[in-house]
Amino acid sequence: MAFFFVQMADPQFGMFAFFSGLTDEEVEERRSRQLFVRKAPKKITGFADESRLYTQAIEATNRMKPAFVAMCGDMVHDPSDQSQLDELFRITDMLDDDIPIYWVSGNHDVGDAPTPESLALYRERFGPDNFSFDHDGCHFAVINSSVCSNPVNVPNEWENIVQFLKDDLSRARADGCNNIILLVHHPWFLEDADEGDGYFVIPRDRRKVILDILHEHDASAVFAGHWHRNNYAEDGKLLMVVTGAVGYPLGDDPSGLRVVKVDGAAVTHQYYAMDDLPDSIEL
Ligand SMILES: [Fe+2]
């Protein structure tokens, strides 16, 4: 049976304030690193913009009534700031009780190079970072892409992810699922599965390990965030979809969310700007 879910990424409470108050030179320096920050010369504090945007996203989701929400990481900008977390959870609580939300860990939630401590804290707050679930015959796997990005402090966690994904997808296919989708924070690649390494993608050697497992089990799509703008690429039949931010945009795409329709093995999707969110979705 066809269904749809809402994918969100990077509400990142605190990011508007973090990138405010920069001089023109500082803005240019960030842009040279592909961080296309806005000019906001006046320093602000708090997270009023993030609250407004995430509230819009949650209210529209309640109207659309998806099967679930996949929140693809960077829930807050600074995980040591309890006020950012409190605001995230206050607004999340407005989500209707019959719409589950699945948390996916981002680098701002667990660190660019996760440690045993940062992972333990994340798991306490959000639950497991590597898990899977099923909806109407479609299997969804979630893994911690920050560990895939840089496992130097937790090499065993990387080994665990590889084994988890192999076992999980084998079991899902053996159980007769009709589709496999991966939900992560980092894109595996932006243009081409063989492209070089960079801040916004998973390094090539570990990227290949994960892509090989996905291809072996005929996964149809990967949905990610992290780039704070939309991007679409393919590796054979596998779609690599990057979704713009609920919060601070780092490109031309406005803050928004994605609606993903799943009908058997077929996956279609559309990004909606926060000011143009639909009230209902036709399947
Ligand atoms: Fe982010």
Image: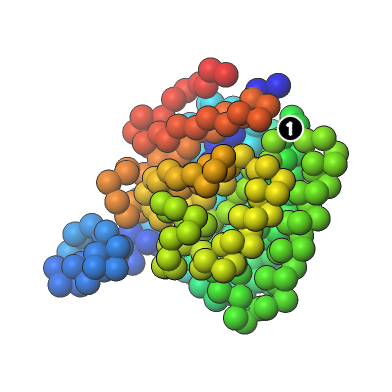
* Residue 147 position in % (x across, y down): 61, 69
Q: Nearer the viewer, residue 35 or 77?
A: 35
Q: Nearer the viewer, residue 78 or 139?
A: 139
Number of callouts = 1
Horizontal side of 147 relative to 179 (left or right) equals: left
* Local crowd size for mark 1, using a 10 Å CA cut-off: few (<14), some (14–19), many (≥20): some
> What color scheme is it?
rainbow
Q: Nearer the viewer, residue 45 or 279?
A: 279
Residue with the most extreme left position: 24
| SS category of the residue bearing label 1 | loop
Asked whether the viewer can see residue 82, the reply is no
Horizontal side of 145 relative to 243 (left or right) equals: right
In this rendering, the answer to whether 13 lies above or below 260 is below
Asked whether the viewer can see residue 38, the reply is yes
Q: Nearer the viewer, residue 49 or 128?
A: 128
Q: Quadrant of the N terminus?
A: top right
* Residue 261 position in % (x across, y down): 57, 29
- Disc 1: residue Cβ within 8 A of ligand 1's nearest atom: no
Q: Quadrant of the C terminus?
A: top right
- Quarter of the figure with residue 18: bottom left
Q: Residue at x 51, y 68 (%)?
A: 203
- Quarter of the figure with residue 140: top right
Q: Residue at x 72, y 76 (%)?
A: 156
* Residue 128 position in % (x across, y down): 72, 60
Q: Residue at x 37, y 61 (%)?
A: 15
Which residue in the protein does label 1 denote?
178
Q: Amino acid at mark 1?
A: Asn
* Residue 90 position in % (x across, y down): 55, 50
Residue with the most extreme bottom position: 153
